[in-house]
Amino acid sequence: MMTDDERFMQRCIQLAKNGQQNAKPNPMVGAVIVSADGRIIGEGYHVRCGEGHAEVNAFASVRREDEALLPESTIYVSLEPCSHYGKTPPCADLIIKKGVRRVVVGCIDEFAEVQGRGIRKLREAGIEVNVGVLEEECKVLNHRFFTFHREKRPYIILKWAQTANGFIDDHHKPTQISSTFTKMLSHKLRAEEDAILVGRVTEERDHPQLTVREWEGPNPKRLVIDRAHPLNLESLHSQNILSLIVEGGAQTLRSFLVQNLWDEIRVETNTMMTVSGGTRAPQIPANAEVVESKSYGDNQIILYRKA
């Protein structure tokens, strides 16, 4: 059973996800203000990069008649409040100014200009701070943002579809492995990520559109690589590309696996389809662990992350 702190942090995570498209390259953050009697008196999330952070929007939503409750209230934030001047003033300063009694933080911000400084500033001001409530869920929410700043590259998702006996095509000719529904899910993923990559052979053989057609949202940046045009991760980092889908073919996917250059693998298997030959699907690496497995009719999608 969830504690009150966990329940309100879960609400922060729900709010944060509303900023999935427009907050980038900033992280998704949600904030909830709760009075001493357990009533939510303010909520907010980071709507758009360059605009108010979650804490700012949460305080702005507090009704005038509830402002007197702030000194005995708790503010829940899924990510550590910022302590530096960027496009907006520090949220830690705003929290101190508003005079709340307690702050509950989901996880520490790994961004170099924050990294615990916001929490330290709050504690030095005499505010009680509790860190690490639903920490793993809050980290997963922004694993793209954290990877981008920690590794200086995009969060990399390797993705392929395979037959029940482990082939990604039928005798080296494209074949429809995904169902109508799972194809829609692939386009949903494209709408959520910043860029998508295939190898030159796949580009010339299959002419993939790599667009969002079955879902609403922006098309990812299209990238094609080969030996003469290798992937420049530093360039993607400088362009604020937080995430990259690698859709193959097999040689391209294996090149990422050999370099251990991946964060997530999504494998769709058509459990009712077999072929007598073709291109073998890549092997799942030993350091991959299953974090999610879902079935959609005859098709199963398994999500792996590094152990």
Image (cartoon, grey):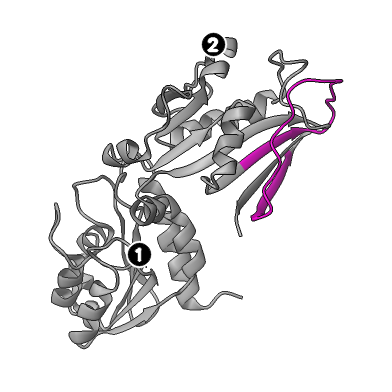
The range drawn in magenta is: 266-295
Residue 236 picture quarter: top left
Pick the quarter of the image with the C terminus: bottom right
- SS type, badge 1: strand
Q: Is residue 175 above or below residue 17?
A: above
Q: Amino acid at mark 2?
A: Glu
Q: Would residue 290 be found to the left or right of residue 127 on screen? A: right
- SS type, badge 2: helix
Mark 2 or mark 1: which is in front?
2
Q: Is residue 230 above or below residue 242?
A: above
Q: Earlier in the sequence, mark 2 or mark 1?
A: 1
Residue 30 spot, x, y in % from top left: 35, 59
Residue at left offset 30%, top offset 46% = 23
Numbered badge on residue 137: none
Q: 3 or 214: which is nearer to us?
A: 214
Residue 112 spot, x, y in % from top left: 26, 63
Q: Amino acid at mark 1?
A: Leu
Q: Which residue is mark 1?
A: 79
Which residue in the rendered view is the most extreme toward the front?
228
Residue 114 spot, x, y in % from top left: 25, 66
Residue at left offset 33%, top offset 54% = 149
Q: Which residue is mark 2?
A: 204
Q: Would residue 159 be found to the left or right of residue 108 on screen? A: right
Q: Is residue 303 above or below residue 276?
A: below
Q: Would residue 35 be found to the left or right of residue 49 on screen? A: right
Q: Does the magenta segment cover residue 273?
A: yes
Residue at left offset 32%, top offset 41% = 234
Pick the quarter of the image with the N terminus: bottom right
